[in-house]
Amino acid sequence: MKVRILILSTILVTFLAGFVCFKPSGFFSAQSRMKWFLLTEAEPVFTHAGPFLSVIFFDKDNGIAVSPITIDKTDDGGTNWTAVKNWDENNRGFSSIISANGLLWIVGSEKNKPLILTTKTHGYKWEDWQKINLSGKSTTELQSKFSVFYDMCFDPSGNAWAVGDGGVAQLIRGDREWQVSNIADSKDTLYSVSCNSAGQVWAVGENGAVFHFQDSWAKRKIDENSVFTRVVSFGKEIWILGGKSSSADQDKRKGVLLRSKDGGQTWENKTPESASVLNDIYINGVNGWLVGNDGSLYSTRNGGNSWSKENSPTKNNLTKLFPLDSQNIWAVGERVSVLKYQDSSLPLPERKKNW
């Protein structure tokens, strides 16, 4: 009996060892090949090039990006870009590009007034662009308070919330125009706004300013020594990013990353150690990415509880992330630099000199 038990135990141990050492050919091997690549950047002499402030991809090849004065398109996954049009002759400046309600939206400024543009054609047929006319009794008030919109989001009812140098404006969309519903004043410029499925709106900006809307506006200061440039809602969690403002060397400001899991009542400091200014975040379940100045890239595998610094192929400041799926993630930044996270076994398109 003892001999039989010994034989069975040996067989079981051998089987378990083989099972533990076995790696499926799909997920694990694919993940080990994933890497960040620098697809393109302008030469240092081209001081007019960029930065890319925001980017959106429709598939793994076709995308649109905006710089302060240009709108650029790519059809090879981000290696080569063509300017659709240079708008600086119209005194226009762009801040951000947003995808919502089946359309693309760009916010910015024109002749010291806030600007909103949209397209139904992925930005390729620019004759379809419409300049949104602001109307309603609050239009004069809006134009007296705002000279620029930096960001915009849409709530579940389809109304828009835009932020800029005058605070937050709620815009109700009509057939051909926007009506200004109300304005939440702010002496501090606001740079980012986020709408979630529960109808809550968060906006952040200079001097640690944080605005929260749910039925009415609540204003608060979380850290007056910080400049918050990005707020994002992932489910019930709210993330705020930016950097400390109390530094003589502005290029080496320390980063700030805050998380709230209770609707903004309390905040946890999740800033990676020695991080410079942080500009954008993306989390999907437990996995996520974080980008910032000096080409910094961080990853998380536990929902943002901790962050690991990753090797970066650039020292350029990175401003925005765009995830198409887990195998295709882009980051853009200064000098119109474009990075992509993809399978390293896949070939990259040939790079042409476009700047």
Image (tube, rainbow, N blue to C red):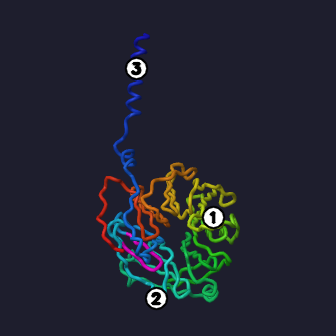
**Mark 2 residue element:** helix
Q: Residue at x 40, y 29 (%)?
A: 17
Residue at the image position 44 percent from the left and 57 percent from the top: 312
- Give neighbour class at mark 2: few <14, some 14-19, many 20+ (Cα, 10 Å): few
Name the mark nearer the viewer: 1 or 2. 1
Q: Which residue is mark 3?
A: 10
Whether tag 1 and tag 3 are in contact, CB under 8 A, the answer is no
Q: Residue at x 43, y 78 (%)?
A: 48
Question: What residue sits right under mark 2 in the picture?
Answer: 90
Tell me the distance, in whole angstroms, between the alpha carbons under discs 1 and 2.
Answer: 35 Å
**Crowding at label 3, few (<14), some or many (≥20) Cα neighbours within 10 Å?**
few
Q: Please tell me in which quadrant of the rendered image residue 5 appears.
A: top left
x and y percentages locating residue 120 in the rendered image:
41, 77
Q: Position of residue 47 (x, y in %)?
A: 44, 76
Q: Earlier in the sequence, mark 1 or mark 3?
A: 3
Residue type at mark 2 is: Asn
> Can residue 33 be seen from the camera position used here?
yes
Instruction: Name which quarter of the figure residue 165 lies in.
Output: bottom right
For the record, the magenta segment spans: 63-73
Look at the image and say whether residue 18 sits in the magenta stretch.
no
Label drawn at residue 244 = 1
- Of the 4 image quadrants, the one containing the N terminus is top left
Mark 1 surroundings within 10 Å by alpha-carbon count, few (fewer than 14), some (14 through 19), many (20 or more): many
Circle count: 3
Q: Which of the two residues, 322 or 102, is positioned nearer the viewer here?
A: 322
Sooner in the amino-acid sequence: mark 1 or mark 2:
2
How far across and down, in percent of the image, does residue 171 sit? 58, 79
First reached walking from the N terminus: tag 2 or tag 3: 3
Mark 1 falls on what kind of element?
strand
- 305 on left or right of 62: right
